[in-house]
Structures are given as structure tokens and as C-alpha cells.
């Protein structure tokens, strides 16, 4: 009887993990020089949910906007983004599809950017958002060394939407 209970418990544990799809990845150990945000703070961001896409015509860049569970719950409920919300933007250079020339496809990652809402750490930043940008060049990431003033300047344009450009729509 004891073995049946152990086997049943193992079965239940293994079944509960089968349905969860997780990508395990490591990001470089990099830090934003201006605010101390680390790339590691969004490790495994590939498991976040896609909530929007944008195309930057000035950079010929397709951006996937992904959020952690805290932000996803707020997006789903059309609520303001709370403390602990993380938004990741992955910027891809685009190219013409080789087998369908009227379409474009993502080619190479140019940057990974993120925002984290933290009133303690970013009390002096509009909306209490901290910003990080990690640029990819020659297959290696580096921290953006020009600071976060340009991030703040652009996101101030979205003040009426909580400093977030994406509208609260769920794609999937």
C-alpha cells in the first residue's frame, strides 16, 4: 500500500509538470551603468506572454512585447500595471522572406529592452519605471552605455497610458 501511495504521488507530481512549457535560458551577466538593472533580472523572459507587437519604421525593427505574470494579469483585466510588472521588448531587424517576397520576417535580434515597475528603486522616475537596454552586436550583448534618459523621454509620450506604449490587448 505504501508503494502505491508513493507511485501515485510521483505520478501526480510528474503530471503537473507536463502541462507547463518552460524555456530555460541564461542571459549575459550585464548591468545598466546608470541604474544598476541587471540583464539577469529578466532571465527566462522567453516564458513571458506576448501582449503586443510594434514596428519601428525608423529602425526597421519589429518588436515583440512580452510581460511577466504580474503585468499579464493587469493587461488581462485592463487594470493599471502594478508593482513588480516587467515588460520586455525584443527588437528584431527584419528582412524579406526568401520564399514569399511580399512578406518580412524577423532576422536578427538587435536589442532586448525591459521595464520594471518598482516604486522603491525608481521613486524619482516617472511612473516608478526602471529601464534597461542591452544591445546585440557581433553576436554579443552589451549594456547600453548612453543612460536611460532617452527611454524616459520616449515613455513620457505615453504618460496617459501609464508610461507604456502598448494598449491593453492580449494577442493570444
Image: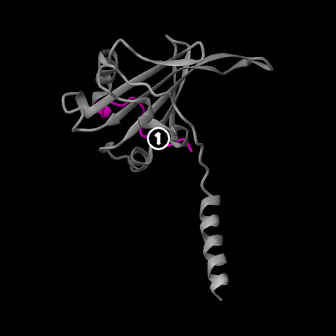
Which residue ends up furthest to the right in the rendered image? 99
Q: Position of residue 29 (x, y in %)?
A: 46, 28
Please give left or right for residue 47 compared with residue 32 in the image.
right
Q: Secondary structure at mark 1?
A: loop
Q: Is residue 170 magenta?
A: yes
**Quarter where residue 1 is shown:** bottom right
Number of other residues with Cα within 10 Å of mark 1, as a class: few under 14, some 14 to 19, many 20 or more: few
Q: Position of residue 112 (x, y in %)?
A: 49, 25
- The relative height of residue 37 versus residue 103 in the rendered view (above or below) is below
Q: Residue at x 60, y 55 (%)?
A: 20
Q: Is residue 163 magenta?
A: yes
**Quarter where residue 40 is shown:** top left
Residue stretch rendered in magenta on the structure: 160-172
Please give left or right for residue 11 compared with residue 35 in the image.
right
**Quarter where residue 7 is shown:** bottom right
Coloring scheme used: one colour
Q: Position of residue 8 (x, y in %)?
A: 64, 77
Task: Give the main secondary structure of the magenta stretch.
Answer: loop
Q: Position of residue 165 (x, y in %)?
A: 39, 29
Q: Residue at x 35, y 26 (%)?
A: 131
Which residue is the site of mark 1?
169
Residue toward you, 144 or 64:
144
The number of numbered discs placed on residues in the rendered structure image is 1
Q: Residue at x 25, y 33 (%)?
A: 127
Q: Residue at x 47, y 29 (%)?
A: 89
Which residue ends up furthest to the bottom in the rendered image? 1
Amino acid at each position: 500500500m505504501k508503494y502505491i501511495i508513493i507511485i501515485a504521488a510521483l505520478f501526480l507530481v510528474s503530471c503537473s509538470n507536463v502541462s507547463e512549457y518552460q524555456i530555460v535560458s541564461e542571459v549575459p551577466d550585464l548591468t545598466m551603468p546608470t541604474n544598476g538593472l541587471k540583464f539577469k533580472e529578466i532571465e527566462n523572459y522567453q516564458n513571458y506572454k506576448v501582449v503586443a507587437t510594434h514596428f519601428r519604421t525608423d529602425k526597421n525593427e519589429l518588436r515583440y512585447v512580452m510581460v511577466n505574470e504580474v503585468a499579464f494579469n493587469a493587461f488581462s483585466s485592463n487594470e493599471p500595471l502594478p508593482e513588480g510588472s516587467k515588460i520586455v521588448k525584443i527588437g528584431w531587424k527584419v528582412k524579406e522572406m526568401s520564399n514569399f517576397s511580399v512578406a518580412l520576417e524577423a532576422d536578427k535580434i538587435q536589442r532586448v529592452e525591459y521595464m520594471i515597475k518598482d516604486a522603491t528603486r525608481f521613486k524619482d522616475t516617472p511612473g516608478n519605471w526602471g529601464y534597461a537596454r542591452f544591445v546585440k552586436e557581433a553576436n554579443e550583448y552589451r549594456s547600453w552605455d548612453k543612460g536611460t534618459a532617452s527611454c524616459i523621454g520616449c515613455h513620457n509620450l505615453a504618460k496617459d497610458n501609464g508610461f507604456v506604449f502598448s494598449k491593453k490587448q492580449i494577442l493570444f
